[in-house]
Image (cartoon, rainbow, N blue to C red):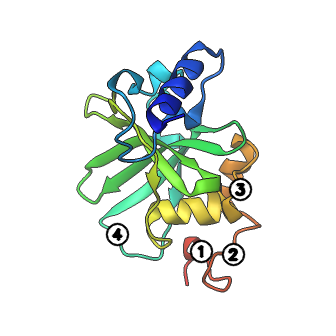
């Protein structure tokens, strides 16, 4: 079966299934995905969360000095099919500017997909064709979230409660490639 036929078959099966398939999104830059298989997250059956409330934001610390302070909306956190962790990430600048995204990690493959970007009117603008791509460096915010909180050892947290706890206190299984140094706790 060609890659084109395989991608089309997967898209059609996902569209017929009652449960959304989070891995139905194509890999970054896959030229064999036909236009009819490209769709937004909500068209793939992935519900966008409510806009994040200030009281639900959990701060994320990384080892790098950053222009933005990052937070994860604890209420948006979910785990799908045991391997995909979805969450809202909020970046706040010193001047009050915000960058809000709804995204996911596929833990076993160390990939991420962005489903939607936040607008200034506190609504979502869905990505027309969300795709899985690599997660950044371990000392950047998404790398820290992946390795030390949501996907330690490339295994997803088991549920939202474990994820929120890991965001607040660090995941007990997370040591990282730095010999146990945890950028989320400072060096």
Query: Gap in Å between the C-alphas at discs 1 and 4?
Result: 15 Å
- 2 or 3: mark nearer the eye: 3
**Number of other residues with Cα within 10 Å of mark 3, as a class: few under 14, some 14 to 19, many 20 or more:** many
Given residues 94 and 81, the one toward you in this image is 81
Q: Secondary structure at mark 4?
A: loop
Q: Secondary structure at mark 3?
A: loop
Residue beneath the point at 32% across and 47% down = 99
Residue beneath the point at 56% across and 58% down = 110
Labels 1 and 4 touching (C-beta < 8 A) = no
**Number of other residues with Cα within 10 Å of mark 1, as a class: few under 14, some 14 to 19, many 20 or more:** few
Residue beneath the point at 62% across and 43% down = 84
Who comes first in sequence, dot 4 or dot 3? 4
* Residue 21, image x, y percentages: 60, 29
Query: Gap in Å between the C-alphas at discs 4 and 3?
Result: 27 Å
Q: Secondary structure at mark 2?
A: loop
State which quadrant residue 10 falls in: top right
State which quadrant residue 130 falls in: top left
* Residue 1, image x, y percentages: 54, 34
Q: Secondary structure at mark 1?
A: helix
Given residues 65 and 147, the one toward you in this image is 147
Using the image, tell me which numbered label, if any, was put on residue 155. 3
Given residues 73 and 159, the one toward you in this image is 159
Find disc 1 in the rendering and name its residue. 185
The correct choice, above or below, for 158 with respect to 136 in the image is above
Labels 2 and 3 touching (C-beta < 8 A) = no
**Number of other residues with Cα within 10 Å of mark 2, as a class: few under 14, some 14 to 19, many 20 or more:** some
Can residue 8 be seen by looking at this rendering?
yes
* Residue 82, image x, y percentages: 72, 42
- 3 or 1: mark nearer the eye: 3
Find disc 2 in the rendering and name its residue. 175
Labels 4 and 2 touching (C-beta < 8 A) = no
Using the image, tell me which numbered label, if any, was put on residue 66. 4
């Amino acid at each position: 079966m060609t890659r084109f036929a395989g991608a089309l078959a997967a898209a059609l099966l996902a569209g017929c299934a009652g449960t959304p398939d989070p891995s139905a999104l194509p890999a970054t830059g896959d030229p064999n995905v036909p236009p009819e298989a490209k769709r937004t997250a909500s068209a793939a059956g992935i519900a966008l969360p409510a806009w994040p409330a200030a009281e639900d934001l959990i701060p994320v610390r990384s080892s790098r000095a950053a222009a933005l302070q990052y937070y994860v909306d604890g209420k948006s956190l979910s785990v799908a099919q045991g391997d995909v962790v979805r969450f809202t990430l909020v970046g706040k600048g010193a001047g009050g500017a915000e960058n809000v995204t709804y995204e996911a990690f596929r833990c076993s493959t160390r990939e991420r997909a962005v489903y939607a970007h936040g607008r200034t009117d506190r609504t979502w603008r869905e990505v027309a064709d969300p795709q899985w791509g690599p997660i950044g460096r371990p000392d950047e915010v998404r790398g820290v979230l992946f390795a030390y909180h949501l996907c330690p050892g490339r295994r997803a947290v088991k549920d939202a409660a474990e994820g929120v706890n890991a965001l607040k206190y660090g995941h007990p299984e997370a040591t990282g490639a730095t010999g146990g140094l945890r950028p989320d706790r400072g060096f």
